[in-house]
Image (cartoon, rainbow, N blue to C red):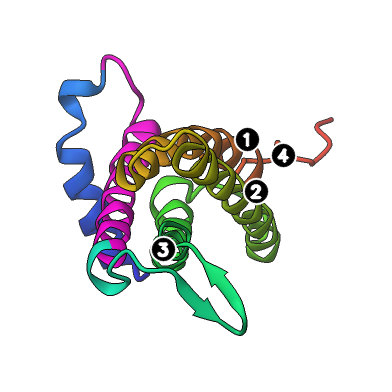
């Protein structure tokens, strides 16, 4: 992402921050704006994939049978998670002084954990509790988003203290 695009996007997001500045800092607001937009996109892609692309039908690939609510998750996740990483890295946590390759590795670990959490919650809510897939996806997304924010802030994109020795 080039500097002009980054500044334009941040200016747009920051324009809406003043009414909320009393309750949340700028970084958290940016995370909510970026994460909220990305989450909304994820839910729309999930809903569209489940209802129109997959037409609520089981997907058969290489002898496997994948439930439509799980395959819709795979589709939406494959778009929203890389976008979420870019938004987090360049807009929300640009001050992180951890090397990009380490951020990427940590993000991959976080992605793996989020995939597992999404799968477990969707299976629990849809198959276990018999809830509708889209509301189950929304609840799952909320739970996973809280976990993701805490992990990104304190692990993936944290700012390491200066390691220089002060004399």
Determine contact: label 4, label 1, CB under 8 Å.
Answer: no
**Which residues are the magenta region?**
22-50
Question: Tag 1: Cα neighbours inside 10 Å, few (<14), some, or many (≥20)?
Answer: few
Q: Residue at 27% across / 57% down in the picture?
A: 47
Label for residue 154?
A: 1
**Residue highlighted by disc 3:** 68
Mark pair 2, 4: CA separation:
29 Å
Question: Does label 2 or label 4 sit earlier along the sequence?
Answer: 2
Mark pair 4, 1: CA separation:
16 Å
Label for residue 162?
A: 4
Q: Is residue 130 above or below residue 6?
A: above
Mark pair 2, 1: CA separation:
15 Å
Instruction: Name the quadrant containing residue 109.
Output: bottom right
Mostly what secondary structure, the magenta segment?
A: helix
Pair 2/3: label in front:
3
Instruction: Name the quadrant containing residue 18.
Output: top left
């Amino acid at each position: 992402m080039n500097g002009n695009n980054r500044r334009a996007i941040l200016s747009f997001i920051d324009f809406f921050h003043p009414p909320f500045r009393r309750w949340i800092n700028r970084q958290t607001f940016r995370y909510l704006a970026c994460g909220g937009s990305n989450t909304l996109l994820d839910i729309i892609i999930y809903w569209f994939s489940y209802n129109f692309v997959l037409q609520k039908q089981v997907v058969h690939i290489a002898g496997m049978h994948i439930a439509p609510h799980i395959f819709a998750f795979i589709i939406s996740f494959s778009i929203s998670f890389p976008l979420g990483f870019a938004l987090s890295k360049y807009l929300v946590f640009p001050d992180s002084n951890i090397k990009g390759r380490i951020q990427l590795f940590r993000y991959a670990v976080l992605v793996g954990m989020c995939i597992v959490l999404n799968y477990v919650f969707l299976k629990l809510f849809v198959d276990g509790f018999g809830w509708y897939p889209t509301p189950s996806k929304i609840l799952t997304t909320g739970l996973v988003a809280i976990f993701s924010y805490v992990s990104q802030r304190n692990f993936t994109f944290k700012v390491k203290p200066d390691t220089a020795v002060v004399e």
